[in-house]
Image (cartoon, grey):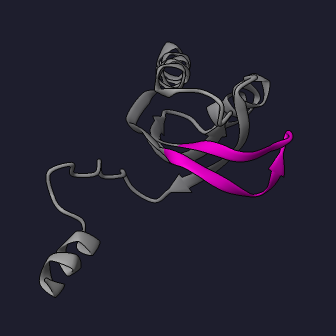
Amino acid sequence: MNYYEILYVVNPNHGKDKISEIIGEVNSHIESKKHAVVDHNFWEKKALAYPVKKQKYGNYILLNAEFKNSDFVNEFKVFLNLHAEVLKYIIIKLDGKPEAPKEDAPSKAEDKKEEEK
């Protein structure tokens, strides 16, 4: 099995409902080809380093996926290129299975803030 981390940026003018719809479209495309989604999270709206398609901001979405064969990566790149809402993306092959982030555990930054008080 091949594991990949995909970070893609979508149009900043969309609300959470539209972003959830885009995430659903990406998930359904991957699952329709018999591959698996490990984790798929919306990060936040951030400023871009340079304008992309006349946008200065973008909504960042992180996807961890399991592709059964590496040929699907090129097909997935075509899908992202043709998707009207995706501004940019990057695909990175991982050495092992990614771990899903733990929602309950506080982050190290939060721990440090509590210690300072």
The span shown in magenta is 44-60
- The answer, for residue 2, to whether it is visible in the render is yes
- Closer to the camera in the image, 23 or 64: 23
Report the quarter where the N terminus lies. Answer: top left
Does the magenta portion include 50?
yes
Task: Give the image location of residue 62, x and y in percent.
Answer: 49, 44
User: Does the rendering let one see residue 5?
Assistant: no
Identify whether 49 is placed above or below 72. Answer: below
Quarter of the image with the C terminus in it: bottom left
* Position in image of residue 30 (x %, y %): 52, 23
Residue 20 horizontal side relative to residue 83, left or right: left
Compared across the picture, whether 88 is left or right of 107 comes to right
Residue lying furthest front: 117
The residue lying at 56 percent from left, 22 percent from top is 22
Percent across and percent down for residue 43 are 46, 46
- For the point 49% across and 46% down, the residue is 44
Q: Is residue 48 above or below residue 112?
A: above
Residue depicted at 45% across the width and 37% down the height: 66
Residue situated in front as seen by the camera: 22 or 2: 22
Residue 13 among those drawn in magenta: no
Q: How many marks?
A: 0
Q: Point out residue 16 in the picture as x, y percentages from the top left corner.
A: 47, 27
Instruction: Specify the principal SS of the magenta part.
Output: strand
What residue occupies the far bottom of the structure in this picture?
116
Displayed quadrant of residue 73: top right
The one of 40 and 107 positioned closer to us in this rendering? 107
Q: Work out whether 40 lies above or below 28.
A: below
- Front in this rendered view, residue 61 or 82: 61
Query: Which residue is rendered at x = 36% and y = 52% of the image?
Result: 98
For residue 58, above or below residue 30: below
